[in-house]
Amino acid sequence: MNPHPPQIALFGTSADPPSIGHRSILEWLSQHYDRCIVWVANNPFKQHQATLGQREAMMQLVIRDIPANNIELHPELAHSRSLITVERARSRWPHANFTLAIGADLVPQLPSWYQSAQLLQQVTLLIMPRHGAPLLPQHFERLQALCAHWAIAPIGEDIPPVSSTDYRIRGKHSVIIPTVAEYIHRERLYAWDPVSHSTP
């Protein structure tokens, strides 16, 4: 057995569009894990404005913007059930230790995820602090009841308090990187953008 199994961070997101917040998370993960494996997924609780393929293309642009060579986009891992994604990752990297990175806003939902107890036995949970998503004692009590192993990322102010909604709904250019902005204009994405309403 390998005495030093690779430490792999798993990070999935709907990325509609990927923001500078996503970029900050990926850069931080790349600095603390041997590999950072990313996928873009459809969120059943959201109505996406960009297609899955378009969001994957934008995420690839974000990855290229980060000065690291250990961040990889793996669309084949994506599944609406995180347990299936983790099992796919384990099949591909059978000797790795996996850490599943999720935003703090998802922690209250975790106990209701598909076979959450089984999922949390296969990974260490890394909670990424998020502006407007407080972590309460009852959240950790539920994780403890599921025998989860978790940590809160000591990322401090490194993640800007922004979200994809800031761009998708409000059109704030400051929350996306320039190459993603160029892609959005070229593909005429998002209804607020005057480019999307222009005549061909």
Image (cartoon, helix red, strand yellow):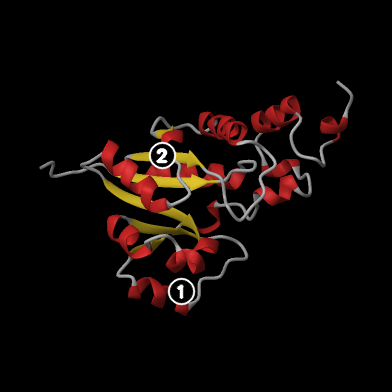
Coordinates of residue 106 in the picture (x, y in percent): 51, 61
Residue 67 numbered mark, or none: none
Q: How many marks?
A: 2
Coordinates of residue 110 in the picture (x, y in percent): 45, 64
Coordinates of residue 75 in the picture (x, y in percent): 46, 34
**Residue drawn at (53%, 45%), measured in percent from left and top?**
24
Q: Is residue 53 left or right of residue 173?
A: left
Q: Secondary structure at mark 2?
A: helix
Residue where numbered disc 2 is placed: 77
**Residue drawn at (82%, 37%), measured in percent from left and top?**
193
**Residue drawn at (48%, 46%), measured in percent from left and top?**
12
Residue type marked 1: His
Residue type marked 2: Leu
Where does the N terminus fall, quadrant-wise?
A: top left
Q: Is residue 90 left or right of residue 127?
A: left
Residue closer to the observer: 102 or 118: 118
Cα separation between marks 1 and 2: 27 Å
**Residue drawn at (33%, 70%), measured in percent from left and top?**
146
Residue where numbered disc 1 is placed: 139
Structural crowding at the residue carrying mark 2, measured as other residues with C-alpha within 10 Å and reported as few (<14), some (14–19) or many (≥20) = many
Where does the C terminus fall, quadrant-wise?
A: top right
- Residue extending farthest to the left is 1
Coordinates of residue 187 in the picture (x, y in percent): 72, 27
- Residue extending farthest to the top is 200
Q: Is residue 55 left or right of residue 191?
A: left
